[in-house]
Image (cartoon, rainbow, N blue to C red):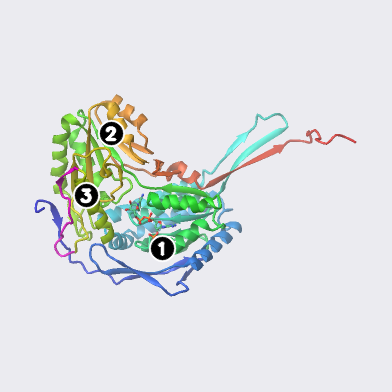
């Protein structure tokens, strides 16, 4: 363990805990019960925020506020230009507040401060791109239906949208959804994870400053039960967009089915990177190392399994192990840190249990496999972990661990690599490494994944849509398709002139 790169406690003074209240109908409110929940910094173990704990009552009030704001057209009937102007102001304000937002994001989530800064600044670009899309809402026209007919297909905002977000990328995931819903003309009720609510609340301050009409965006803090459940079941909501676990995604689909509201889901993944012998192995090893440890592996896009050609497997694993030792794990407040803390002690225990189960199933841990002691901080860290000798039926090859744990499988032929990559209930993303374009394209076409990267990993752009196949989700986020999710389609069929033959016979 001593040969790992560990960044000890930076000893930075932490700010006083932030207080968060619900934002409903343009007002800051406490829960009727007066209850609050505390969030401890995963790395530092002290309270960093205290948030109102919502009940069904706050969720219902927020839905009513969003419903009124949608139905009276204060946002939904604005021009695309007017909506875009506000979204652009929000983007500017986000950029002006990167440091403030990044600090609390790091304190609540445990992710490195430089990563938080990158995510907040990058989110501003999502708002800018959504602003551009707000001016492109358009349908179709049909001018060849016959001399006396003309039809247009209109795109309208779907209505009130419930947005339920997780703790792993609180501000980034919110920004994959909210600006696109707003660009479409929807109004929203948001429930962040109770562990990482602050940047969502702070965003509301910016929305007010940017001039967003009250009631268009509402935030209810608290737990999935009861807040998320009300936001999913309520007949006043037209759509739910959710990012989180596959288990809760299925629950949401069931509940929303009672009122047949639209559901968009961004769920888990067991994303493979396939490495062929002719690949640029230095780049591939670096990308695999990045792909598995980024956000301590608490990432739907984590490349938590690799499928390596048998001939190079030993050498490739040795490269990844050597690189893993150089990745800086430790205090997220130190700008040198690349990998921070695990979100909760319970989740750290789940990661460790998954590793132990892999060993019991016959796999071999070649690096890590235990909690990581960071001098001056607690034990809510996990060592970079590489596991080989993994076979396709093992849980470590199939289940999302959501930790810094890499499972190594091997293959001999392209067909075998494709079969192994697709042998999963998930289908979020996949990667292929080869200098042969034919190999890359053959793999990319056959891969059952919403995104396929060739000779790279996890590059993303506001323009490029994102989402999962199979049990990784339904619907798409960001890009043009990201806004389309929030649009309803209406056909308008018109007769030109009084040419319609009567259906009822003349008397
Ligand atoms: P969950 O899926 O439980 O939580 C995600 C969000 O859904 C949270 O805001 C949560 O609220 C809310 N929620 C929970 N239950 C309901 C419900 N019945 N109705 C509506 N909303 C609900 O994820 P966890 O935080 O518990 O993480 C567990 C696992 O999920 C991880 O280990 C990982 O495997 C996976 N995960 C995947 C993510 C992804 O990006 N695909 C993101 C996060 C987790 P609250 O927690 O506040 O009660």
Q: CA distance from mark 2 to mark 1?
A: 39 Å
Q: CA distance from mark 3 to mark 2?
A: 25 Å
Residue drawn at x 35%, y 33% is 447
Q: Magenta segment: does it hold 155?
A: no
N-terminal label among 3 and 1 = 1
Left or right position of 121 against 26: left
- Residue count near mark 1 (Cα–Cα under 10 Å), binned few <14, some 14–19, many ≥20: some
Left or right position of 344 against 199: left
Q: Is mark 1 within 8 Å of ligand 1?
A: yes
Q: How many marks?
A: 3
Span highlighted in magenta in the image:
362-377
In front: label 2 or label 1: 1
Foreground residue, 420 or 9?
A: 420
N-terminal label among 3 and 2 = 3
Left or right position of 487 against 389: right
Q: Is mark 3 within 8 Å of ligand 1?
A: no
- Residue count near mark 2 (Cα–Cα under 10 Å), binned few <14, some 14–19, many ≥20: many
> Is the residue 403 above or below the residue 429 in the image?
below
* x and y percentages locating residue 71 in the rendered image: 60, 57
> Is the residue 110 above or below the residue 148 in the image?
below
Circle 3 residue: 355
* x and y percentages locating residue 286 in the rendered image: 20, 41
Query: Residue pushed farthest bottom?
Result: 34
- Helix, strand or loop for the magenta stretch, by majority: loop
């Amino acid at each position: 363990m001593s040969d790992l790169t560990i960044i000890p406690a930076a000893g930075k003074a932490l700010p006083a805990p932030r207080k968060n209240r619900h934002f409903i109908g343009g007002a800051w409110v406490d829960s009727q019960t007066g209850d609050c929940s505390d969030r401890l910094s995963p790395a530092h173990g002290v309270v960093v925020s205290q948030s109102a704990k919502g009940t069904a009552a706050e969720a219902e009030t927020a839905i009513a506020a969003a419903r009124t704001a949608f139905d009276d057209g204060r946002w939904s009937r604005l021009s695309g230009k007017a909506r875009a102007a506000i979204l652009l102001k929000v983007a500017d304000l986000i950029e002006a507040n990167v440091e403030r937002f990044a600090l609390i994001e790091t304190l609540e989530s445990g992710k490195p401060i430089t990563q938080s800064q990158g995510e907040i600044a990058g989110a501003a670009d999502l708002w800018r791109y959504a602003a551009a899309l707000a001016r492109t809402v358009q349908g179709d026209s049909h001018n060849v239906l016959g001399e006396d007919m003309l039809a247009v297909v209109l795109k309208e905002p779907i209505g009130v949208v419930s947005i339920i977000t997780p703790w792993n990328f609180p501000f980034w995931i919110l920004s994959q959804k909210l600006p696109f819903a707003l660009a479409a003309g929807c109004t929203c009720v948001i429930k962040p994870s109770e562990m990482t609510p602050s940047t969502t609340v702070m965003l509301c301050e910016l929305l007010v400053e940017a001039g967003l009409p009250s009631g268009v965006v509402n935030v209810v803090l608290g737990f999935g039960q009861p807040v998320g459940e009300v936001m999913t079941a309520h007949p006043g909501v037209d759509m739910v967009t959710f990012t989180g676990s596959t288990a809760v995604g299925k629950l949401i689909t069931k509940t929303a089915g009672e009122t047949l509201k639209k559901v968009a889901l961004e769920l888990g993944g067991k994303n493979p990177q396939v490495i062929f012998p002719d690949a640029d192995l230095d780049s591939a090893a670096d990308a695999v190392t990045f792909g598995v440890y980024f956000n301590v592996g608490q990432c739907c896009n984590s490349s938590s399994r690799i499928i390596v050609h048998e001939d190079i497997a030993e050498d490739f694993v040795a490269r990844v192990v050597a690189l893993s030792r150089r990745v800086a794990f430790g205090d997220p407040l130190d700008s040198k840190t690349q990998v921070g803390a695990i979100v909760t002690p319970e989740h750290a225990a789940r990661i460790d249990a998954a590793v132990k189960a892999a060993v019991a199933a016959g796999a071999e841990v070649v690096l890590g496999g235990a909690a990581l002691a960071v001098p001056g901080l607690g034990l809510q860290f996990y060592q970079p972990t590489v596991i080989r000798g993994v076979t396709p039926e093992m849980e470590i090859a199939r289940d999302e661990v959501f930790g810094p744990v890499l499972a190594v499988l091997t293959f001999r032929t392209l067909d075998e690599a494709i079969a192994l990559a697709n042998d999963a209930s998930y289908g979020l993303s996949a990667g292929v490494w080869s200098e042969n374009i034919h190999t890359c394209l053959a793999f990319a076409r056959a891969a059952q994944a919403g995104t396929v990267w060739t000779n790279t990993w996890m590059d993303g752009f506001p323009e490029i849509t994102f989402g999962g196949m199979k049990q990784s989700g339904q619907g798409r986020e960001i890009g043009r398709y990201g806004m389309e999710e929030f649009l309803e389609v209406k056909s308008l069929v018109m007769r030109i002139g009084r040419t319609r033959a009567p259906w009822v016979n003349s008397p």
